[in-house]
Amino acid sequence: MKTLEIWYEFGSNYSYLSVQRVGELARSRGVPLKWEPFLLGPIFKSFGWETSPFVLQEQKGRYMWRDMERQCEKYGLPWKRPTNFPRRALLPMRVAVLGKDAVWIEAFSRRMMALNFVEDREIDSVEAVSRVLVELGLDAGAIIEQAQDAQNKERLKDQTLRARALGVFGGPTFFVEGEMFWGNDRLDEAVEWAARA
Amino acid sequence: MKTLEIWYEFGSNYSYLSVQRVGELARSRGVPLKWEPFLLGPIFKSFGWETSPFVLQEQKGRYMWRDMERQCEKYGLPWKRPTNFPRRALLPMRVAVLGKDAVWIEAFSRRMMALNFVEDREIDSVEAVSRVLVELGLDAGAIIEQAQDAQNKERLKDQTLRARALGVFGGPTFFVEGEMFWGNDRLDEAVEWAARA
């Protein structure tokens, strides 16, 4: 049995599918799970892209929105195409990196994803993030303050540099001790890889 | 029951997986299959790319080669990473478009793919294409002559324009009466879509 890492970001639509699915899948196979939030924007910039390839390539973007409808139907996940894409998610990503090893990381991540891809709401605000933290029974004020301190800002930058160093080029990406799996389409294989090990 | 179209090209590694799998899958579900060869190069050029994204993006390319090993193992397909990628395939693609509705299109396409992705051989030559056609008991000389006449060259150009008009941005791509599925990862869903219709 090996640990499965999920590298994800709240602005990424295919990360939405995996963030909602990964906890139950990993638990069902007894696979330990590590949550690894990182920023996709700097990764895309390193390729010379100013935004998501789904925006830069019109045909691919159009296809992706249809694919998301079908995939959500397949997995029984709710879905509403966001009117703003990709959404900025800097504050919730900072909270995620602060809480990446906390018991609330899964619930927090799932809820932020649902705000973006089910409720079609902006997520990069103290108000949006507070609401979710309070719902989870957490001290929103203290967490948001700590998420925005200099040390935690650096942690998120470091996560993103680690992602680049690992060869991550999109989200979600999974690792099982160096074995890389890209995309929600490889989540089940990644879980099996970890379970068989 | 609706017809499944497979849009593919001999230089495309993920097309290799689908070309080897699609015939048996479609037959097992009683789904009629149409073979639609097209050139990926002009599609990539329309995005401003001079070659495959797997060459342009080093990280994605490195991942893809590992993914191909795993996918071939999963499907029980032979595999050898080609020493030249992406391989030019103009002549075999012209033969494919000439024979797209012929009984030999599946066997020809599978054999050309195996030359590229199992035997690691160049495929864009009269010699390579002749050998395959002769193996299949066909009149290689006559077919290659007809494949290279002006009218057939236009047919391949038209196929590629049709692919662009349909919104194709990579290979393989599947259509079931206007419903689009991109990539070998969506082949099974495309077959089910056609079977359920």
Image: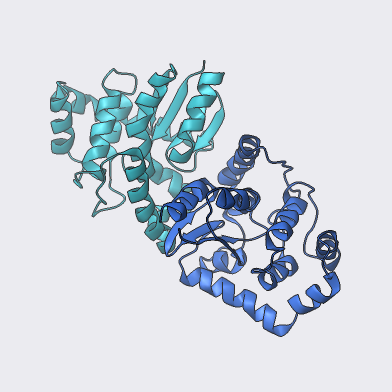
Chain colours: A cyan, B blue
Q: Is residue B173 above or below residue A121?
A: below
Q: Is residue A152 above or below residue A65?
A: above
Residue A193 shown left or right of residue B73 in the figure: left
* Residue beneath the point at 35% across and 54% down: A65
Q: Position of residue A73 (x, y in %)?
A: 32, 44
Q: Position of residue A161 (x, y in %)?
A: 46, 34
Residue closest to the far bottom: B150
**Of the pair A91 and A177, the residue shown nearer to us:** A177
Q: Quadrant of residue B197?
A: bottom left
Residue B137 shown left or right of residue A174 in the figure: right
Q: Is residue B142 above or below residue B173?
A: below
Q: Position of residue B71 (x, y in %)?
A: 61, 39
Q: Quadrant of residue A149?
A: top left
**Of the pair A176 and A162, the residue shown nearer to us:** A176
Quadrant position of the N terminus of chain B in the picture: bottom left
Count of labels shown? 0
Q: Position of residue A193 (x, y in %)?
A: 54, 25
**Of the pair B177 and A49, the residue shown nearer to us:** B177
Residue A40 shown left or right of residue B187 in the figure: left
* Residue beneath the point at 73% across and 66% down: B92
Q: Is residue B82 visible?
A: yes
* Residue beneath the point at 78% across and 49% down: B120
Q: Is residue B57 visible?
A: no
